[in-house]
Amino acid sequence: MVRAAAVGSPLPASGLDIFGDLRKMNKRQLYYQVLNFAMIVSSALMIWKGLIVLTGSESPIVVVLSGSMEPAFHRGDLLFLTNSQEDPIRAGEIVVFKVEGRDIPIVHRVIKVHEKDNGDIKFLTKGDNNEVDDRGLYKEGQNWLGRKDVVGRARGFLPYVGMVTIIMNDYPKFKYALLAIMGAYVLLKRES
């Protein structure tokens, strides 16, 4: 059955008419929607800050961005980190570290450790899938990493869960399409 609309009559509101939906809300409904959104955002931030406190790491969850640690970790694996200052760093451990001048942390294995009597530790890292150690990645003139460079140590992982993050960074248009689909789904779900 086909319905004909009269000329000049308004078209039915689509599920994507966000501003029309906002204009239809009274002040109390709008306040409620804003408050719900703020609660979701603040809950996520509280969970993240709680994880930082529990793990002692500035970044308790990271995604492996390259294949330098294969076969131990693959691109897209999600790593869970801890950073207890009391536990000494040992050869064979997988650490996530930041190098001065680079924004993105690196996930590699500790291959050599030099420990002084005063407790000062210096160590050298290397990716399992790399031919040479990481001295070429460190800042110029730096041959060893120190405790201050460590973001955390790998304690567990979920394989390939982080591929969503990699895809969204490699293909920004995909990120915006995904956000649009999620927004449309929420609006359509709310109408039904």
Image: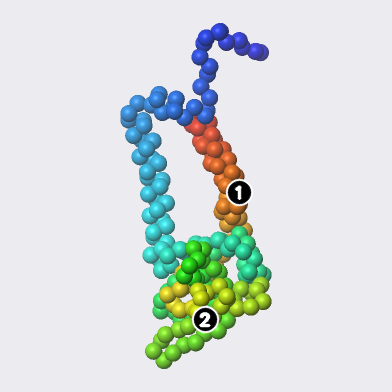
> What element does badge 1 sit on?
loop
Badge number at residue 22: none
Which residue sits at x=52%, y=29%?
A: 16
The tag earlier along the polypeptide, 2 or 1, is 2
Please tell me which residue is depicted at 51% across the width and 63% down the height of the picture: 104
Along the line of sight, the residue nearer the viewer: 73 or 128: 128
Q: Is residue 149 left or right of residue 129?
A: left
Residue visible at 52% across and 81% down in the picture: 143
Q: Three-letter amino acid code at disc 1?
A: Tyr
Q: Residue furthest front?
A: 140
Q: Residue at the location (57% across, 10% down)?
A: 5
Q: Which residue is mark 1?
A: 171
Give the colour scheme of this rendering: rainbow
- Residue 41 in the image: x percent, y percent? 40, 47
- How packed is label 2: few (under 14 Cα within 10 Å), some, or many (20 or more)? some
Q: Is residue 51 left or right of residue 1?
A: left
Q: How many marks?
A: 2
Residue count near mark 1 (Cα–Cα under 10 Å), binned few <14, some 14–19, many ≥20: few
| Residue at the top extreme, as displayed | 6
Quarter of the image with the N terminus is top right
The three-letter code of the residue at mark 2 reads Asn
Question: For the residues marked 2 and 1, what is the alpha-carbon distance in whole angstroms?
Answer: 36 Å
Seen in the picture, residue 15 relative to 1 is either above or below; the reply is: below
Q: Is residue 93 visible?
A: yes
Q: Position of residue 145 (x, y in %)?
A: 49, 78
Is there a contact, CB below 8 Å, between mark 2 and mark 1? Answer: no
Which residue is label 2 attached to?
143
